[in-house]
DNA sequence: GAGGTTCCTGAACCCATGCTGAACATCACT
DNA sequence: AGTGATGTTCAGCATGGGTTCAGGAACCTC
């Protein structure tokens, strides 16, 4: 079992390394975001323990990078205690689990166990579905015919979520919660408005409406 | 997706039920350990949300009972905040995941999603009986010849219930209660109307009428 | 086969939901 | 402060789907 530990605090590392090794993991260690990201890109780890507060590159970005590139290895995120929005952010970014600091080593081991027991999930996806692709760096959509449209921030988040769940029905509440953070209520018709704006850019028929249910990105 | 919620606090239940239903789960609820255990023993749930502090029988015992009897359905455990030993106990007893109270509903849904995705890999949620299959994500029927028809919300719920009970006679009252929530009386001829609409989509003869008794999905 | 009951069917109704265009508010940047 | 871009709210319109109704067909009982 190969494990990547991305953590900058030397004290933490000193505490964790022996415990992880004793638990039977072959541990690699990176002390900053960039190093961690590179290791995660290239080495076949069974699981990653990722701190969020990292020098050089935030943990969340590292995680998003992996997910955006289809890297679907199990990631356990370490967050500050009680920062529940961080945890939700982490889960949204594709974390499989989180643990609030400070934590007990025993608990970390238990959770790693649970994670590695899991079968590998479905293959990672590129954010491209049937000729509709999202340029995540440029924040643009590219259509089949090469046409590209720039997206505003909200449009981008909405489309990204749709593309991550092609063919699935997504309720307005779900969309609301993913486009904005936390418990946003679909008070106004915000989602409708943005769906409309997206449709203008990617084509009316690519997003179906399911009355009373939500919306669905059409997959051909 | 059938979900069993074992939780005694009425306020929690009131908050969770609608959210879970909105997320597409068919939710059964038990208010104590013994009831929950029995339901879990007998019904084919896709996932269980289990509170640990339960009257009549502690959640951990319920979980251990299931695991000891080879019941391997995914279980998410709700624990008191910061009771980390409880969480470790839970994991040792065979929980697949846990969540500390108080938690955010969105977080619960995210974790349930992860759990159910893992448990039913690529199986694609479909209910199928003799060449008649219901695409639960897409809310569509697919016939033997590949023909597909989109379903409205009510049609969908009705057909799903029929498919879950193929070959059984289902009275209009039963259908009413499952298509709508609970105590609805079959005042008008609503069910008749919907049966008709369904027949139009899946074929006249797939649903038999049993005069005075109800309807039955024909199984060949 | 008369009479009653149950079910079928097509159509009409009506309302919640969704769509749309535009105004208004807010933010970032200069 | 001014400007342009983005985010949010609003009001009116369109429409889909849930519901009701009425007339006819099928079925059962006597």
Image (cartoon, coloured by chain):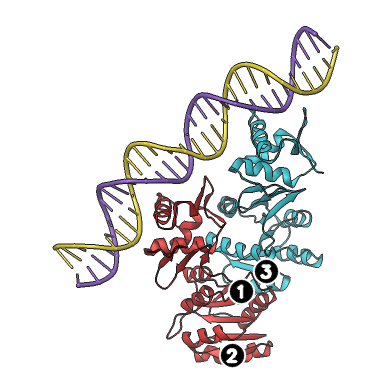
Chain colours: A red, B cyan, C purple, D yellow
> Image point 46% across, 57% down: which residue?
A176
Q: Is residue A204 above or below residue B91?
A: above
- The answer to whether A27 is drawn above or below residue B40 in the figure is below
Q: Earlier in the sequence, mark 3 or mark 1?
A: 1
- Which of the 4 image quarters holds residue B3? bottom right
Chain of the residue under the numbered disc 2 shown in the image: A
Regarding mark 1 in the picture, which secondary structure is present there? helix
Separation of marks 1 and 2 at Cα, in angstroms = 27 Å
User: Contact (CB < 8 A) between labels 3 and 2?
Assistant: no
How far across and how far down the image is residue B47, in percent? Answer: 68, 60
The chain carrying label 3 is: B
**Residue under label 1:** B84
In the image, residue D26 lies at what x, y percent? 76, 23
Distance between the Cα atoms at labels 3 and 2? Answer: 26 Å
Discs 3/2, front: 2
Q: Which residue is mark 2?
A: A28
Residue at 46 percent of width and 61 percent of height: A159
Q: Secondary structure at mark 3?
A: loop
Q: On the image, numbered disc 3 is attached to which residue?
A: B96
Q: Are marks 1 and 2 on the same chain?
A: no
Q: What is the distance, in whole Å, between disc 3 and disc 1 at their CAs?
A: 15 Å
């Amino acid at each position: 079992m190969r494990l990547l530990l991305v953590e900058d605090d030397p004290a933490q590392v000193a505490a964790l390394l022996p415990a992880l090794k004793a638990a039977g993991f072959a541990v690699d260690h990176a002390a900053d975001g960039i190093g961690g990201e590179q290791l995660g890109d290239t080495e076949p780890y069974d699981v990653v323990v990722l701190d969020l507060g990292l020098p050089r590159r935030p943990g969340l970005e590292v995680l998003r990078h992996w997910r955006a590139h289809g890297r679907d290895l199990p990631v356990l995120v370490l967050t500050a205690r009680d920062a529940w929005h961080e945890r939700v952010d982490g889960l949204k970014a594709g974390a499989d689990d989180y643990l609030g600091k400070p934590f007990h080593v025993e608990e970390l081991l238990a959770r790693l166990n649970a994670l590695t027991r899991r079968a590998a999930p479905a293959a990672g996806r590129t954010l491209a579905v049937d000729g509709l692709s999202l340029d995540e760096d440029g924040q643009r959509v590219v259509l089949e015919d090469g046409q590209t449209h720039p997206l505003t921030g909200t449009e981008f988040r909405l489309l990204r979520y749709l593309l991550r769940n092609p063919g699935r029905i997504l309720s307005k509440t779900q969309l609301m919660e993913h486009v904005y953070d936390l418990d946003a209520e679909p008070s106004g018709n915000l989602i409708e408005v943005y769906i409309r704006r997206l449709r203008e850019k990617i084509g009316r028929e690519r997003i179906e409406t399911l009355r009373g249910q939500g919306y669905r990105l059409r997959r051909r």
